Amino acid sequence: MIRLTPGGLVAFGRRYPVQIGRGGLSRTKQEGDGATPVGRLRVVEMLYRAGRLPRPTAWARPIGPQDLWCDAPDHPAYNQLVRAPFAASHERMARPDPLYDIVLVSDWNYPQAAPGKGSAIFLHQRRRLCYPTAGCIALRRADLIDFAQRLTPGAEIEIPPLACFLLGRNTSGSGAAPRPFDKA
């Protein structure tokens, strides 16, 4: 079992430092709240950028240039991989930055999505140290590659309601701590 702790994800006999959502952890995840959902998530798919790194595992699928993820709660394809052209709100999977060079898709509100309960809860590469995500779990590139190579389909990640991440304004070092430019 993979488990989130105050020190990061504990898995495969080691600890992987992580960043979580800017909204901390939430038992009541909603679209746009910036929170990482509390619960037991299963990794159901691995996507990767074939032009940027080798296939991390045999079960990883390449991200194509037209691949998008729908984040429009009122659309029938909400929280699903879709292809361009696509008019509803979405995010591009083939990003110009390296954040989605490897994407571990969780089963949070997927594949049968309830409108507004959150979309695109992934494990992916972090932006930089102490920079929170929009609700995902992010790892350093080298750690993400190592983690992905060890992972098996269906692996479970337990995200307990850790008090250090449930604060209204998360504590320094939590990965969801306020950035210096955040307003109080």
Image (cartoon, helix red, strand yellow):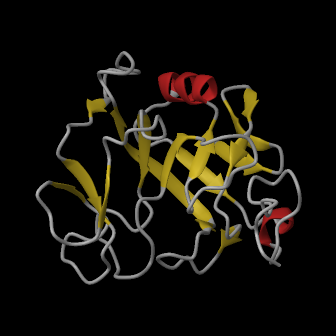
In the depicted structure, whether residue 24 falls above or below residue 76: above
Residue at x 14% of width, y 54% of height: 84
Q: Tell which of 140 and 131 is nearer to you.
A: 131
Q: Position of residue 112 (x, y in %)?
A: 29, 70
Residue 76, picture quadrant: bottom left
Is residue 57 rendered to the left or right of residue 177?
left
Residue at x 14% of width, y 63% of height: 86
Is residue 52 rendered to the left or right of residue 66?
right
Q: Position of residue 90 (x, y in %)?
A: 29, 64
The quarter of the image holding the C terminus is bottom right
In the depicted structure, whether residue 120 falls above or below residue 92: below
Residue 47, picture quadrant: top left
Q: Position of residue 158 (x, y in %)?
A: 63, 54
Q: Tell which of 118 and 159 is nearer to you.
A: 118
Residue at far top of view: 54
The quarter of the image holding the N terminus is top right
Q: Tell which of 12 and 99 is nearer to you.
A: 99
Q: Tell which of 115 and 101 is nearer to you.
A: 101
